[in-house]
Every structure is written in structure tokens, then in C-alpha cells.
Amino acid sequence: MAELAALEDPRAREVNEKHGDDHGVNLGRLRAVAKRLKTQHDLARELWATGDTAARLLALLVCRPKAFERGELDLMLREARAPKVQDWLVSYVVKKSTYAEELRVAWSADGDPVVAGAGWALTTDRVAKNPAGLDLAGLLDVIEAEMKDAPDRLQWAMNHCLAQIGIEHAEHRARALDIGERLEVLKDYPTPPNCTSPFAPTWIAEILRRRGA
């Protein structure tokens, strides 16, 4: 904790707080600490228990994902306040756990929009990597009906899923593009130069262009 405190950078905190993340540690430096520590699951539990955002991010880098129980992962998501902690928990831990599919199904139907967003993030991963058994048309039905008025983080996750369906599944591409065009979610999102817009039709077109499709 003293080492993390020493890495505190006011400029990094200012940038992070604009995204809802209450820490001031440069993530590159945080990853360097994790690389030195390597996997230490007991330490990860202690770091998580502090409640400190930087410590929790470090915990997610040094833990052993398959060592967590299902209920433990569910509680961790619900008590994680910072968006970056929530994102890393899903990406670096839950996706690698043996409970990823169970939690995907449970979280997607949860009344908490942040938890539901995590479920959609896991669904997006399956759309790209393991779509067998997914009802893609059904997912598009839900996105079409609910994305426009969804809270920010849930909307972002559903939009990512929409784009991923359009990118990876040619048979659903026309409908995905149509939904994106009609709903106009994130159409005016400020996008830095050399970055891809999160507006689904633009996102889909750009990735296909890069792939030469």
C-alpha cells in the first residue's frame, strides 16, 4: 500500500476521475508492480479487502482467476465502485473463471444496470469467440428494444455487443447496421483522432475495412 501511495500522480488522478475512477496511479506503473509480484492469490485477497481502487486493480492482476468461487465473484462485482475495477474484474478474472457462463446468464438479467452491463460484456466475448448456442437474433431483439434508454454503462455494453454481432456474423450484419442507424446511440460521441467511433455502424464498417472485407 505504501508503494502504491508513492506512485500517486495528481495528473493521472485528474484524468482517471473524469472516468469515475478514484485513483492516481499510472496503469503502466501498476502493471510493472504486478509483473514483479507475479501471481500471489492470498496477497490479491488482502489487496481487494482494502477497498482501495489502485489496490483492487493490482489484486486483479496478481490473483488466480480460477481460485474464486461463483458467489465471491458476484460479490466482488457488486462492491466494485470504480468502472476500471469492474472492467478489469470481468476481462481479467471472470472470463477466465469456471463460472463465466453461469454469471453471464445471471448478470444479464440483473436489475442493477452495472451488473447487467457486466453480463452483456461476457455475452459480447462469446459473440466473438464462442457463439454456438447463443440466440443472436434474440440478442438483437433486446438491444433494439432496450438500448436507447438504457443507463450509460449498460448502454455502452449493449452497443458493443451490437457492433460485435455486426462485425462477426454476416447473416445478422444488415439488421445490426439498421438498428445502429435508427437508434443513433453514441453517434455524436467525441472520438479522438486515429480512434474508431463507438457508433455501431461506423465501428462495424471500420473493422471490416481493416479486415479487407
Image (cartoon, rainbow, N blue to C red):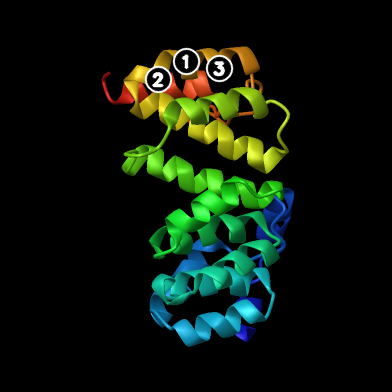
Work out whether residue 141 or residue 62 is closer to the camera in this orientation and state it.
141
* Residue hosting label 2: 172
SS state under label 2? helix
The number of numbered badges drawn on the structure is 3
Instruction: Let me know if residue 75 appears in the view.
Output: yes
SS state under label 3? helix
Quadrant of the snapshot with the C terminus: top left
Work out whether residue 12 or residue 43 is closer to the camera in this orientation and state it.
43
Q: Position of residue 63 (x, y in %)?
A: 45, 76
In space, the residues marked 3 and 2 are separated at their CA atoms by 11 Å
In space, the residues marked 2 and 1 are separated at their CA atoms by 6 Å
Q: Position of residue 8 (x, y in %)?
A: 66, 70
Q: Residue at x 73, y 38 (%)?
A: 151
Looking at this rendering, what residue extends furthest in the left direction? 212
Label 3 environment density (alpha carbons within 10 Å; few <14, some 14–19, many ≥20): many
Q: Label 2 sits on what residue type? A: His
